[in-house]
Image: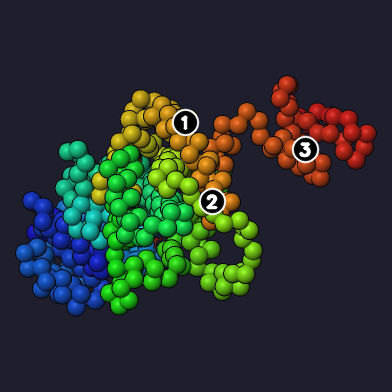
Amino acid sequence: ATATIGVVGLAVMGSNLARNLASREGNTVAVYNRTTAKTDELIAEHPEAGFVRTTTVQELADSLQRPRTAIIMVKAGAATDAVIDELTEVFEPGDIIVDGGNALFTDTIRREAAIRDTGIHFVGCGISGGEEGALNGPSLMPGGPAESYETLGPILASIAAVAEDEPCVTHVGTDGAGHFVKMVHNGIEYADMQLIAEAYDLIRRGTGKSPAEIADVFQEWNSGELASYLIEITAEVLRQTDEATGEPLVDVILDAAGAKGTGAWTVQTALDLGVPVSGIAEAVFARSLSSRLGQREAARGLPGPSQEWTVDDPETFVEDVRQALFASKIVAYSQGFDEIAAGAAEHGWDIAKGDVAKIWRAGCIIRAQFLGRITEAYADDPDLSALLLAPYFRQALGEAQEAWRRVVVTAAQAGIPAPGFSSSLAYYDGLRAEQLPTALIQGQRDFFGAHTYRRTDRDGVFHTLWSGDRSEVSAD
Ligand code: 6PG
């Protein structure tokens, strides 16, 4: 056996990860794909990688040094189960199977539990950074047994992105913790993208700037507190001209956003956990709305605001939008970290939130300067009740909130949808409210279903005899 690690599944992500592994000192990579032609293609294209060619899982197992480690990079779902079953047949106790796909964390929990008794370690590992990240350094979010991390950790660290001399990988927690955190990463990614899109839309319609001019705005923002990969690529996309028509590319791309499901999982899971991730949810729904082309077509004649919208001072408006974007982004991250905390509590994971922010600083899609602030916030106070309450974020929100309100008001008046900005602001105001109208909801629930309520002035549970003499009784 000569190989130190195996990669199963050689589509773009798998091939790139295999090449990344092979390029690091000390690694010899065995590659396997169900269709051998694909394996041969990769080997032929990259002789420098010194791949070990295997054509069956048995050959793969035979080629690997012990404890064997194989990373599965197949389409999440049934294919993952099939490969795990095959590998389980040929692997031995102590060997490690890593699933690097975007698996649903509950599947990962199930898979880990199912093979635990064989003594083989199963590690669900979130991998972020797209094709480019897989090749040059992704952000890695492994879960699974802590013991397996002793073998796996150094291998993953060797291929991970690096932020301030630290590899972007940590053992997130046991079983499905890695995939859970990757899922929330994607939810935040959806929110980030939606907020950026809203900012672009408002600036374009408010100031009449061209996409290329707005690209300059984003480029400038990229040198401030918003500095991030997504802001950077936004400028590039906006600057792109369509070859066929000479129009800005963004004007010829159909405005119906796709989604592969991880954003929806983040929201579904948050609903189950009772965590309000409204910013993320709006981002998922905004994509759904955009894709309902027939309905949108049918609704086109609905009336909008009767008054023309003009922006008096474009420069001030652009700055307001920047602040609204930053504030809404803080809300999205705060909500995402709430979901991580709730998931950890529910599933018994010991997740260091500051470390999660740390491994997102480079390699992944949501990489941003901002993440260093999150790490600092949790380092200063690991028990922070909400991320947005950390001093840095609290101050940033305080400074941005007036501009944020102006932007939301303007969007509503102009008839421009800004669901991310407005729902984040509503969340902010809801969270800081002295009193919420939910007392009334409790009253209504008690009225029609005797669902009971608690009081502000006394302990206990109460019910009003709504259909009787309307006196209050204890319902303890
Ligand atoms: C990443 C990305 C990656 C991908 C998702 C989301 O972290 O590298 O999140 O996993 O972009 O599949 O894609 P959709 O937008 O298609 O849901």
Which mark lies nearer to you, 1 or 3? 1
Q: Residue at x 48, y 39 (%)?
A: 403
State the image coordinates of residue 119 (x, y, percent, origin top left): 30, 50
Specify which label sits upstream in the sequence, 2 or 1: 1
Image quarter for ligand 1: bottom left
Task: Residue under label 2, please give it.
Answer: 411
Q: Check if mark 2's residue and mark 1's residue have beta carbons within 8 Å.
A: no
Camera sees residue 61:
no
Q: Check if mark 2's residue and mark 3's residue have beta carbons within 8 Å.
A: no
393 over 156 or under it: above or below: above
Secondary structure beneath disc 1? helix
Task: Residue under label 3, please give it.
Answer: 443
Q: How is the image coloured?
A: rainbow
Q: Residue at x 32, y 59 (%)?
A: 212
Specify which label sits upstream in the sequence, 2 or 3: 2
Q: Amino acid at mark 1?
A: Gly
Specify which label sits upstream in the sequence, 1 or 3: 1
257 over 168 or under it: above or below: below
